[in-house]
Image (spheres, rainbow, N blue to C red):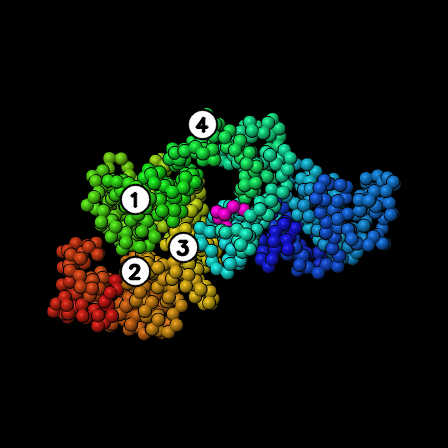
Amino acid sequence: MTDDDGNRMGTRPIVGRAVQLAAVRAAWDRVLADGTGETVVITGDDGVGKSRLAAEAMAAMEPSAVLAGRARAVGPAPYDWLASALDGQSLDGLPAPPEALAWLTQRPSTHRYEPGALLRLAVDVVRHRVGEGPGVLLVEDLHDLDPASLNLVADLAAARALPALLLVTSRPAGDGTAARVLAQLSGATRCHLGPLTPAETAELLDGATGAPPSPRLVLGLHRRTGGNARWTTEIIAAVRARELATPLDSPLPPYLASLATARFDGADGRVTRVAALLGASLRTDALTDLCGGDAEDAVARLAGQGVFVRDRAGEPRFASPLVAEALAQTAPPSLRAKVHRRAYARALDAGDLDGEFRHGLHCGRAVDPRPAVAAHLAAGRPRAALELANAAGPVRDSGLAREAYIAAHSVGDYAKAADYARAWSASAVGAGKVEAQRVIADLWGHGGSIASQHRLLESIAPRVAADGRAAYLTALGRAALYAERPAEAVGWAEQALELTTEPDPAALTVLGHATALTGDGERGLALIAAGRRYAAAARDLVVFGRAVAASAAVRLPGLSGEAARRVLDEHLTALARHDLSGRAGPVVVAAAEAAVAAGETVHARALAAERVVIEPDRVERAMLIALTARLDAAAGDRDGAQRLRRSLTAETIEMDAPRVLRASAGLDLALAEGPGAAEKALRAYVGAASPDAHAAGLTEAGRVALEAGVGEARVAVLLPDGGASLGIGAGAPGAELTAREREVLGCLAEGMTNQQVASRLGISIRTVTVHVSNLLRKTGSASRTEAALWAVRHGLAGGR
């Protein structure tokens, strides 16, 4: 079964249209309350769900009369709408002469009527059908209606005494009579339907499969369909019916390709297919070269129909990516060969590296993609660079693999970035191989595997050349940041900057972020801003994205309301301007956490819910899942929170990043049933927290544990401040220890030497010696071993 947009409806829920649906229902309620006419205009491109919205709204109404009509499929004729609405109904008793009814139902008689008189009779017929109301007049696809029908719609909209809801669907206003009528519908409630958002695409996928889709699937399907509801639904239906292997890469099934191209025939069909085959090389002059002089008129006509939109240079681009895909797929082989051959020749003449590679592939030419990929990166187009690298197939050249890695990391496709980094490492030698392995180590840390990152960095240290030393030290600084050791990160970044003669944006960004975390926020932000500025000048989009994320992480905490929203928008805009929206996860997480801290839980959950379904960064996705689950648990939805906890477990396998461990433990605390589970979760939270940096979080964790039934003495023992922030445990064992002494004691309980303690905590051996001496005195121990046993006995072992 299909709706009037041609979608296979099944039982799929309407997604992303709640506001518009409420607006239509509110207009209907006014008709019921006042007995007067209301008009609602629903606009949107083909396939966005206009008819579906109208049908969904009408399903909740109980009108006494319904007149529903649309234009004829082929060529408009006078009074198409009314003829369609009256089709199959009895005409007995209608207030119009038989000859007039013959004209109004498109069975012309020999009797001629003056247009104004026939229009008045048409209005009378509609009034008679509505009667005392309430009625619904559904006008589908106003943009295709004939002038007489358009005049009738305008008169009906002006008839306020008519107790009916006039519900109109149309493409957005272009030129001509339909556009004027749309503009004349004053007082109408206007609902415009845009493309589905990625989050709404995820909701459709979830509803169809019963399982949360991966971000890669959501984003890939959204790009393929352009967010068009019709094509999204059709792709999902085709996969479920096994007519399509995957939603992302499989060729369109014949019926779907035919459906997408059905409206194109004759000259327009040729122009659109040539345009689709040209792809990124599409230019009006190229179309004219391949299609003749009428191509420009065809482009203008098709733009008016919503098939093409204009880019900033005024060149045509398909409004629907899937329609372009279907047109290219169904192009005759002879046309395909001709277009690619001519386009390849044009690309060679124009020095168009992208076009040379893309069309060369179809012409059987062995074209090196690396110059085109490098050109896209140099111009700040990482997504185009990645698409080109992906089209090249398996990458065995270290130079291309390196640039493909940069492109993938820049746009936030971390899975692809890891693939290309491994290919780079496999094909590189010497310093290039070390650089590739350093990048792989960074990806480990970025993905939350801190121990793996440190092991790989340590393994390559002996092979780091002098000219790669600064980059290696910067990588150590970034690793320290991932491990939440900012003082150590400051040291590494400062050493890196001492080795460089030019400003190093990567080291500046690490130093700035670490400096802010150690308490000097103003200087830290200045350093981050400098790193961001130099990265932008160098077109280093990987570092630019890191600098934006670091800036957000420093500026957003403590903000609320409009101030927080301004900072969030500023950072999201900076990323979008450089095609880096895929890297927005850390920014959104910082904003959501700031909103939670400010008590703006509804806003926080909305931010998290919209981002989590498309977040490619596993750590940020885990943080968003944990935050959403905590909010659900606080709102009483424990079942929903438990489902998210299971998702979080799957996401965080092999992760040891402290922030992820804290988020998991915090969620376990919120969901704990009984004091045993709560104490275990509190112990895990304390083990992943820094007493200084996470004091507020530790206090909150202790409060939750107390509410779950954990005794005050146990909470006081576990908390680094001995429970002082909660007003408990003043006499508990270890209450007199400082936060640093507790950290040192935990290290002693692990059997560490003074050297190892100093390395773990980022302090000097002399300072460790002083702390050990104080610990022996305060715990009444005669040796380090006795102090360690005391720590175990009193529950202070293993936690920092």
In this rendered view, identify the residue nearer to me: 621 or 39.
Answer: 621
In this rendered view, identify the residue nearer to me: 724 or 782.
Answer: 782
Residue 430 inside the magenta-drawn segment: no
Distance from Cα at disc 2 to Cα at disc 3: 20 Å
Residue 250 inside the magenta-drawn segment: yes
Distance from Cα at disc 1 to Cα at disc 3: 29 Å
- Residue sitting at 50 percent across and 32 percent down? 340
- Residue sitting at 39 percent across and 60 percent down? 650
Q: Earlier in the sequence, mark 2 or mark 3?
A: 3
- Left/right placement of residue 93 relative to residue 489 reads right
**Disc 2 marks which residue?**
689
- Residue sitting at 86 percent across and 42 percent down? 109
- Which stretch is magenta? 247-252
Distance from Cα at disc 1 to Cα at disc 4: 33 Å
Residue 128 seen in this snapshot: yes
**Disc 4 marks which residue?**
348
- The residue type indicated by label 1 comes to Ala
